[in-house]
Image (cartoon, coloured by chain):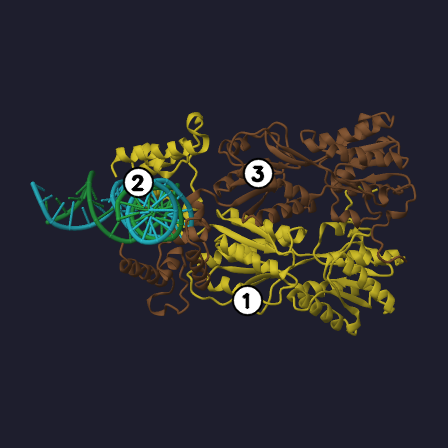
Chain colours: A yellow, B brown, C cyan, D green
Amino acid sequence: MHLLDYFLNIHFKRFQGCFASYGFLECPMKKKEKITIHDIAMEIGVTASTVSRALNNHPRISPATKKMVLEAAKAINYKPNRIAAALRHGKSKLIGIIVPTINRNFFSSIVRGIEEYANARDYKVMISQSYDDYKKEVETIDALLDARVDGIMVSLGKNTHSFSHFESVIQKGIPLVFFDRTTDELEVNQVVIDDYSSAYQATNHLIQQGYRHIAHFTSHMKIKIYQERLRGYTQALLDNGIQFDEKMVVESNMQLDGGRTSARYLLDQGFGFDAIFSASDYAIVGALQELKKNHVKIPQEVGLIGFSNEPFTEFTEPALSTVDQKAISIGENSAALFFEMINGDHKPKPMIKKTLEANLIIRTSSSRIPNIQLNTNSTNPN
Amino acid sequence: MHLLDYFLNIHFKRFQGCFASYGFLECPMKKKEKITIHDIAMEIGVTASTVSRALNNHPRISPATKKMVLEAAKAINYKPNRIAAALRHGKSKLIGIIVPTINRNFFSSIVRGIEEYANARDYKVMISQSYDDYKKEVETIDALLDARVDGIMVSLGKNTHSFSHFESVIQKGIPLVFFDRTTDELEVNQVVIDDYSSAYQATNHLIQQGYRHIAHFTSHMKIKIYQERLRGYTQALLDNGIQFDEKMVVESNMQLDGGRTSARYLLDQGFGFDAIFSASDYAIVGALQELKKNHVKIPQEVGLIGFSNEPFTEFTEPALSTVDQKAISIGENSAALFFEMINGDHKPKPMIKKTLEANLIIRTSSSRIPNIQLNTNSTNPN
DNA sequence: CCAGCAAATGCAATCGATTGCGCTATTATA
DNA sequence: TATAATAGCGCAATCGATTGCATTTGCTGG
């Protein structure tokens, strides 16, 4: 194509665009022309190829040309069209994230970790929620595949006990990372916190505070994290010479109401518990409410400790001890894992599992023995 | 191009792809071929044009052909490539959302509302957080523009007092919707709740409960919602013959610590307040903590009411009265507004502002007068 | 002065779907 | 029966950026 033809062509196209949007007679001044590399090319008298290479810092382009291109690009306010680039080299630079719900400090912090790590590398994230619904999770995987994401990071829904929807992801060779709520039934790279160790520490802490009859709130045993927390709880009991009692392990949905019901159950059964280690902050708040309603003194009569360090644990009366899961770090590590996967040679590698250490946060609800540094919100000693 | 050529071409391409990924000798069986409309076309002996039209239910394609196409598509497991489509007709079918933080029940519920409305119409959402940081907000707008979103929905950051970053969005003709945290300095369609009315009701409720010296916690007056809430508060006082006292309006960051500080301030100044209407739930929790530390009885001595119905307001002792903002509805309405904008003729229209009614939720913290239906969590009367 | 090589660019195909226009049959109208 | 319509589909350009290969230009060395 000759230069003149090209010129005419460009302008003809613009004219059409204008026409389509505004009607023939009132095409406004502010022509919202799409600026492409061709415009830059024309501007400085090279071809689009050169512009493209210059923008991508290709070694075969002279520094002088690069400089010109960059300047021209800035001058006419060029914005690369990632969609076109995505189509060409098959990468959307999008990462799909699926979490049960974003409405949890824990998950939204993980997302934040992923987002910051990814954005710094020119990737964007698409967040979806499964609402702990299996069907929705399957649909969402499909939707992300549809959106041509370059990778998917998932925290499994509570009701996900079948994993065939991930197989298509794996077969397509799309990097997949599980975080927090994972499964062993699939060979997928994952990032988790050391649930076992955290649970052990939490339980151990209760024992050190003099509690001996410690109940445990948990959820569906299909989920790895609950298995591990139970294991840590059990081991801590054993190591301290306390008999493990199956009756003291209460299963629920781990929500507020589940916690209430579980506490109610313990009270009704008269098991004589003096502490609860819950695998969820929500459930422990429910228990707290139920116990207070029954005039049980916390932490004097019953010690409580939750899991996740949700913000509200600081607001309750008394403030709840809990386990901080370093959510942002989980997010960053998950993202890092993704980038390892796309950057390495594509040879099959053994599964990677990163396990991060969590932090026990001791507040009033589990502090029977007086302790100086318990007051978490003391900026104003009074 | 002859059919045979095309055939060879296709297979040559596949071979290359295989080669690149796995090395020559070990190209595995599971060929991860990209399936396109051309594959469907070959399968049933038509051209890609026909397939495309059939898939899009174009009227000029015979029902018989459509049926064949659909079946072939299903048979070979075809997935449309939205990126290619996006490039062609300039629509990414993506909506960008910017919220200060997703880690709030209010915002994540709005997002949920948007998401469900949009997904039902084959649109996906990209969520970004500004963290109430102006610079980050500007960058995020840019990032969304980069990602070629078809529309942007924003709740402004607390520190956003300049709005030039939205002008490029408007100029590009990209639909823009503000929700909740909006501004009047820009002619942008918006969805808000009736902050004025909600604040009026909340304040009025306190007055009806016998409180007379009502303080108000607020934040930066540049933000519309805080202006409105202050206005509602003021008007309610006036309408009840109570003198408005500027000293009783305390400004802070509206976080937990801000609430603590503000309460501390009120106590120190000895203004003799007997109630607080806070424009934020976080701040009212801070106040609650500070007051309890000083042995102030809630609600007997001081009544409290917050704003947003964050989940933890139910968990505090006593449970906090608050205003439920119908977040999901805000989300749905915002999304609906977006679709109105892209579906209508593109003629300039007057600005649309949807105002939704909020719900006053009365709990213990503001109930001085005994009332039967105050117990919010009584499934188990005991 | 010319082959030979490297550096710097250009050409044109490509990614996958869409779409204006044009080309056949087939049906309807005169 | 002949012509006009119309239905149904194909051709090829297009969206904007990328990239293998070809080409041009500039230099070096013989």
Nearer mark to the viewer, of 3 and 2: 3
Query: Disc 2 on helix, strand or loop?
Result: loop
Identify the residue at image location x=48%, y=46%. A122
- Total marks shown come to 3
Tell me where residue D6 appears, x and y as whole percent.
Answer: 39, 45
Tell me how far mark 1 sits from mark 3, CA to CA.
38 Å
Alpha-carbon neighbours of circle 1 within 10 Å: few (<14), some, or many (≥20)?
few
Q: Are marks 1 and 3 in contact (CB under 8 Å)?
A: no
Nearer mark to the viewer, of 1 and 3: 3
As drawn, the label of residue B340 is 3
Q: Quadrant of the C terminus of chain A?
A: top right
Question: In this rendering, does residue B228 appear at all?
Answer: yes
Q: Is residue B40 left or right of residue B279?
A: left
Tell me where residue A342 appears, x and y as whole percent.
Answer: 46, 57
Mark 1 and mark 2 on one chain? yes
**Does residue B211 sit above or below A264 in this rendering?**
above
Q: Are marks 3 and 2 in contact (CB under 8 Å)?
A: no
Alpha-carbon neighbours of circle 2 within 10 Å: few (<14), some, or many (≥20)?
few
As drawn, the label of residue A321 is none
Subunit ID for the residue under disc 1:
A
- Residue topped by disc 1: A164
Tell me how far mark 3 sits from mark 2, CA to CA.
49 Å
Mark 1 and mark 3 on one chain? no
Subunit ID for the residue under disc 3:
B
Of marks 1 and 2, which one's residue comes earlier in the chain?
2
Identify the residue at image location x=37%, y=56%. B38
Subunit ID for the residue under disc 2:
A
Tell me the kind of residue under disc 3.
Answer: Glu
- Residue topped by disc 2: A62
Residue in front for this viewpoint, A199 or A18: A18
Tell me the kind of residue under disc 1.
Answer: Ser
